[in-house]
C-alpha cells in the first residue's frame, strides 16, 4: 500500500511550487559538484552590518590531517566584564557540500540578540573524505575553541553546539564523541532538522519520496558518500550516524526540531524519545507542514518565524 504524505503548510506549499524545476528533492552522485558550486557562491555578510568583527583562522586538525578552517565572529560592542557565551556552528550541505559560511546567518542573529561569540567550523567533505574525517575535523575545532575561548572573548564553560541538516547530525555526533572522549562538555546542543540515520528506511523517508527539497534518494547519495558500502549495514559508528548510538545518557540538554512533512521527521522524533528514555533533557518541536529547511526556503512564512523564535527562546533559557 502506498504511503500518503502529510500536507505541506500552505505558505510553504506555495513557495515550493514557485521553485518547481529549480529546487529538486533528489541528489544523485553526479549532482554533487553542482551542489558545491551553489554553496560556494552563497554571499553572507558575516559582520551583520558591522555588529561583528570576523576573522578566518586555520587551527590544528586531527593527527596527521590538514588544519581546520574556523570563522570567528566577535561582537564589536564595548567590552563586557565577563566572557561571552560561544555558539559553535556546524554547517549543512548533505555531508558533501558547504563551507563555514553556509547557514551561519541564524547563529549570528542569535549572537546579536544574546551577546555571544560565533565560531563556525569547516570540515572535509565526502566522498573524497569519508567518515571519520568530517566528525574528527568538527571535534578538533571544538577542542581549539574550548582551549582558546577566553582568547576570543568567550567562556569555555558556556559553549553551545548547533547545526542544521547534515550539520545537525554532526552536532549530535559531536556531543556523543565529546562525552565518550571526556572532552569539552557543551552546555547544550541545538539540532535543526538533523540528519541522524544512515538506514534511510523510516516511514517519513518513504512518505516524502520525491517531495520537498531533500528526499530519500538524496539521503542515499549523501550517506553512501560518507560510508560507502557500510551504509545501512551493521557496523556503522554512532559518530557517523548518531541514531546508531545505543547509549544516549549523559548528553548535554538538547533542542531538536523538524518538519512534519520531511524525510528526517521520524528519526528526529525517535532520537528525542531515546534521550528522554535515557533520563536526559530534550525539547522537541515538530513543525506542522514543515518541509526540510523550510525556514531558509521561506524565511518570512509564519511557521519559519515561529521556529526561529522557539530556537532563540531555548537558547535564552539555557544561557540564563
Image (cartoon, helix red, strand yellow):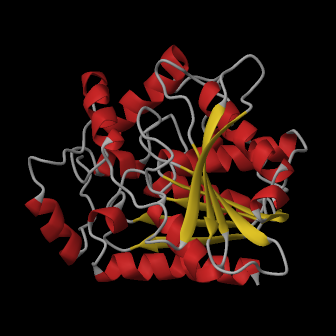
Query: In the displayed structure, would residue 258 be above or below residue 224?
Result: below
Relative placement, left or right, of 148 versus 241 is right
The answer to whether residue 217 is visible is: no
- Counting the numbered discs, the total is 0
Q: Locate the C terminus and report the quarter of the image it occupies.
A: bottom right
Relative placement, left or right, of 142 versus 207 is right
* Residue at image location 49% in from the left, 65% down from the top: 47
Farthest residue to the right: give it.
182
Query: What percent of the width, then of the height, locates residue 313?
Result: 59, 83
* Residue at image location 74% in from the left, 37% down from the top: 140
* Residue at image location 45% in from the left, 23% down from the top: 225
Relative placement, left or right, of 122 versus 278 is left
Between 79 and 193, the one lying in front of the other is: 79
Res 150 quadrant in image: bottom right
Query: What percent of the width, then of the height, locates residue 74?
Result: 64, 65
Query: What percent of the width, then of the height, locates residue 177?
Result: 77, 41
Res 242 quadrant in image: top right
Query: What percent of the width, then of the height, locates residue 65?
Result: 69, 20
The answer to whether residue 112 is visible is: yes
Between 144 and 89, the one lying in front of the other is: 144
Between 171 and 90, the one lying in front of the other is: 90
Amino acid at each position: 500500500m502506498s504511503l500518503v504524505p502529510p500536507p505541506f503548510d500552505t505558505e510553504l506549499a506555495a513557495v515550493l511550487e514557485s521553485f518547481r524545476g529549480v529546487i529538486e528533492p533528489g541528489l544523485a552522485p553526479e549532482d554533487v559538484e553542482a551542489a558545491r558550486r551553489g554553496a560556494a557562491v552563497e554571499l553572507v555578510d558575516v559582520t551583520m552590518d558591522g555588529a561583528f568583527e570576523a576573522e578566518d583562522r586555520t587551527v590544528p586538525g586531527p593527527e596527521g590531517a590538514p588544519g581546520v578552517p574556523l570563522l570567528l565572529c566577535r561582537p564589536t560592542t564595548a567590552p563586557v566584564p565577563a566572557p561571552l557565551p560561544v555558539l559553535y556552528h556546524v554547517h549543512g550541505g548533505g555531508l558533501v557540500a558547504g563551507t563555514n559560511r553556509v547557514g551561519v546567518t541564524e547563529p549570528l542573529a542569535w549572537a546579536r540578540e544574546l551577546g555571544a561569540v560565533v565560531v563556525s567550523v569547516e570540515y572535509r567533505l565526502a566522498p573524497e573524505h569519508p567518515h571519520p574525517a568530517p566528525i574528527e575535523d568538527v571535534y578538533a575545532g571544538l577542542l581549539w575553541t574550548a582551549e582558546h575561548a577566553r582568547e576570543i572573548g568567550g567562556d569555555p564553560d558556556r559553549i553551545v553546539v548547533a547545526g542544521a541538516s547534515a550539520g545537525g547530525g554532526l552536532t549530535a555526533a559531536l556531543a556523543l564523541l565529546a562525552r565518550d572522549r571526556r572532552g569539552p562538555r557543551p552546555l547544550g546542543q541545538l539540532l535543526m532538522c538533523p540528519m541522524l540515520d544512515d538506514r534511510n528506511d523510516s516511514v517519513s523517508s518513504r512518505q516524502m519520496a520525491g517531495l520537498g527539497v531533500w528526499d530519500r534518494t538524496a539521503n542515499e547519495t549523501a550517506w553512501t558518500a560518507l560510508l560507502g558500502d557500510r551504509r545501512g549495514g551493521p557496523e556503522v559508528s554512532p559518530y557517523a550516524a548518531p541514531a546508531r548510538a545505543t547509549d544516549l545518557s549523559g548528553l548535554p540538554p538538547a533542542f531538536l526540531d523538524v518538519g512534519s512533512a520531511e524525510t528526517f521527521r521520524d528519526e528526529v522524533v525517535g532520537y528525542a524519545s531515546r534521550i528522554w528514555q535515557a533520563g536526559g533533557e530534550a525539547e522537541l518541536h515538530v513543525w506542522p507542514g514543515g518541509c526540510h529547511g523550510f525556514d531558509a526556503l521561506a524565511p518570512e512564512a509564519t511557521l519559519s518565524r515561529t521556529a526561529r523564535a522557539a530556537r532563540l527562546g531555548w537558547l535564552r533559557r539555557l544561557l540564563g
